Image (cartoon, grey):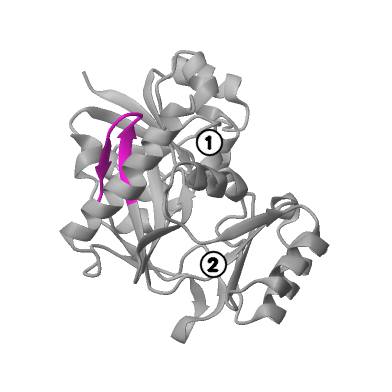
Amino acid sequence: MAERVLVIGSGGREHALAWKLAQSPHVQQVLVAPGNAGTANSGKISNSAVSVNNHSILAQYCKDHNVGLVVVGPEVPLAAGIVDDLTAAGVTCFGPSAKAAQLEASKSFSKSFMDRHNIPTARWSSFTDPQDACKYIQDAEFPALVVKASGLAAGKGVVVARDKDEALKAVLDIMKDKAFGSAGETVVVEEQLEGEEVSCLCFSDGITVSPMPPAQDHKRLLDGDQGPNTGGMGAYCPTPQVSEEVLQEIKRSVLQKTVDGMREEGTPYMGVLYAGVMLTKQGPKVLEFNCRFGDPECQVRSFTSLLS
């Protein structure tokens, strides 16, 4: 029996998800809330005005409109527990729980998690006091540093500093001037890794992982890898930098280890796990985790496994 699917979100990522879902013979209709101009009245796809912030109203809407599956695009509703609340109300929802989504919602949590489970990542420390963060930077043995707002900052809360002075300024901008609001109440300062950065995503049922083709996005605002980091200035997929051998190493040492670790800690990870990985001379190392499809990476991926 064909199902009605509700996609949560309003960006190009959600347009891509809706477009691919609508191609499945198992899907009768795709609703997108709130959606955008590209998802408005396009064949099997249409927008919905239902509020996605009130989870009880959303759950009742799904029951009233016979929605068989909810697919969550952005990270904010995941961190707010949309999957927990809809699942508790009897609505099938694709994505991780709020506790599992901490892998993205708190960089401090994710770095500690990686240390606990021996997942390769940069040397780091986290701070709630700007003075402590600045002292760490001044005393750091590695000259190139990255300063990150620990909370959700729409992919923009990362400053790749050229030197220690720029790192010190980033701490003050984030923690004192609130450049990213409450997301910067805690900052993570880590060594800057060198190499090619790739986005490695997988599907997970909480036990196993099924990797997607790796992608690479362009984060800097300006040409020549200049300007501030953004949420992504474009992407391509697949990536020639990631051989099948390297992908299997990332699957083993990063993706599977993460899913195993989350299950061991009582927070099984189900949905899409996104690892931003730097291909260093010492091997793949994790820059960050996201708890959903990337945007723009989602737009250039194959979704064959999503519909199988």
Q: Secondary structure at mark 1?
A: helix
Say whether residue 124 is left or right of residue 47: right
- Viewer-closest of 218 and 281: 281
The image quadrant where one finds the N terminus is top left
The answer for how far apart the CA atoms under marks 2 and 1 are is 21 Å
Give me the residue at 24% from left, 64% from top: 242
Q: Would you call the spot at circle 2 few (<14 residues within 10 Å), some (14-19), or many (20 or more)?
A: some
Q: Amino acid at mark 2?
A: Thr
Disc with the residue nearer the chain's start (2 vs 1): 1
The residue lying at 29 percent from left, 59 percent from top is 300
Q: Position of residue 302 (x, y in %)?
A: 23, 51
Q: Is residue 168 magenta?
A: no
- Of the 4 image quadrants, the one containing the C terminus is top left
**Mainly helix, strand or loop, the magenta region?**
strand
Question: In this view of the protein, can residue 268 be seen by the observer?
Answer: no
Residue nearest the viewer, comparing 284 with 233? 284
Q: Secondary structure at mark 2?
A: loop
Task: Quadrant for residue 174, please give it.
Answer: bottom right
Q: Nearer the viewer, residue 252 or 197?
A: 252
Q: Is residue 30 left or right of residue 1?
A: right
Q: Of residues 110 and 220, which is closer to you in this image?
A: 110
Give how far across and how far down residue 282 sits, in percent.
35, 67
Mark 2 and mark 1 in contact? Answer it, CB < 8 Å.
Answer: no
Residue 148 visible in the current orientation: yes
Q: Which residue range is magenta in the image?
A: 201-212
Location of residue 147 in the rendering, given as x and y in whole percent from the top left corner? 63, 65
Residue located beneath label 1 in the image: 78
- Look at mark 2 in the image and give the residue it sits on: 230
Instruction: Give me the disc on residue 5.
Output: none
Outermost bottom residue: 224
